[in-house]
Amino acid sequence: EIVLTQSPGTLSLSPGERATLSCRASQSVSSTYLAWYQQKPGQAPRLLIYGTSSRATDIPDRFSGSGSGTDFTLTISRLEPEDFVVYYCQQYGSSPFTFGPGTKVDIK
Amino acid sequence: QVQLVQSGAEVKNPGASVKVSCKASGYTFTSYYMHWVRQAPGQGLEWMGIIYPGGGSTTYAQKFQGRVTMTRDTSTSTVYLEVSSLTSGDTAVYYCARTSGWYGYFDYWGQGTLVTVSS
């Protein structure tokens, strides 16, 4: 089973700042099979990024993804008020399809 | 438009079973895969398994094997998750989520079903 670790657990920033979220895998993940999701309180997760760097439909271009091998990054270039929520990475190339524990972005 | 609509909240006693439904619309039901993911209160996301509505094949996460059953009804475009021998540790929101392939990203999610296990 591929274990995903996300850091930091909580990221405290101000609106307009840049957020950098990390996802590290216990073994190599093909870049084709790494996704990021956003989850707002009381809602289902929403797909942000798939295939490491492809934005899902209707996702603003302030969200971008990068990485390879065991290290992946989600970057939010300028935080908007609605971005202060929780983000999960997921690998879907090897069953079981595991998620990271999440990074909470909160307002500083 | 693609929609996944899940059944309502459930309260169950320890040792009981629960069956949650997920009705799909807006796409060809048998051409996509459906996963179940759960989230305990205040916790992260946990993948439970996958079903292919086109043929009914399933794969379950090892943790849930023997206690989880995923089925589908193609006449109503609905998938089902049944969990047996419930304990308080099964209290969670259960989500269905769609992928276009066995190895796919989860592009659409149901709204979630809260299952509470309590005596």
Image (cartoon, rainbow, N blue to C red):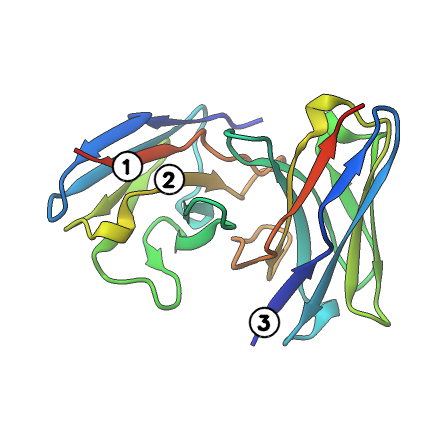
At numbered mark 1, what does the secondary structure look like: helix, strand or loop?
A: strand
Q: Whole-Å distance between the Cαs marked 1 and 2? A: 6 Å
Do residues under tags 3 and 2 come within 8 Å of each other at their CB atoms?
no
The chain containing the residue under callout 3 comes to B
Q: Are marks 1 and 2 in contact (CB under 8 Å)?
A: yes
Mark 1 burial class by Cα count in 10 Å: few <14, some 14-19, many 20+: many
Residue beneath the point at 58% across and 26% down:
A1
- Image coords of residue B74 (percent x, y): 84, 68
* Relative to B11, B3 lies left or right: left
Mark 3 against mark 1, which lies toward the viewer?
A: 1
Is residue B101 placed above or below B48 in the rendered structure?
A: below
Q: Which mark is residue A105?
A: 1
The residue nearer to you, when weighing B20 against B96, is B20
Q: Amino acid at mark 3?
A: Val
Q: Are marks 3 and 1 on the same chain?
A: no
Q: In the rendered image, which quarter contains the C terminus of chain A? A: top left
Q: CA distance from mark 3 to mark 2?
A: 24 Å
> In the image, what residue occupies the spot 80% across and 30% down?
B65
Q: Which residue is mark 3?
A: B2
Tell me whether the residue at label 3 lies in contact with that at label 1, contact meaning CB atoms closer than 8 angstroms. no
Find disc 2 in the rendering and name its residue.
A86
The local crowd at label 3, few if under 14, some if 14 to 19, many if 20 or more residues have their Cα within 10 Å, is few
Q: CA distance from mark 3 to mark 1?
A: 29 Å
In this view of the protein, which residue sits in the foreground, A72 or B64?
B64
How far across and how far down the image is residue A2, in percent?
52, 28
Residue B46 position within the rendered picture, expressed as x and y whole percent measured from the top left: 59, 34
Q: For mark 3, give the secondary structure.
A: loop
Secondary structure state at the residue bearing disc 2: strand
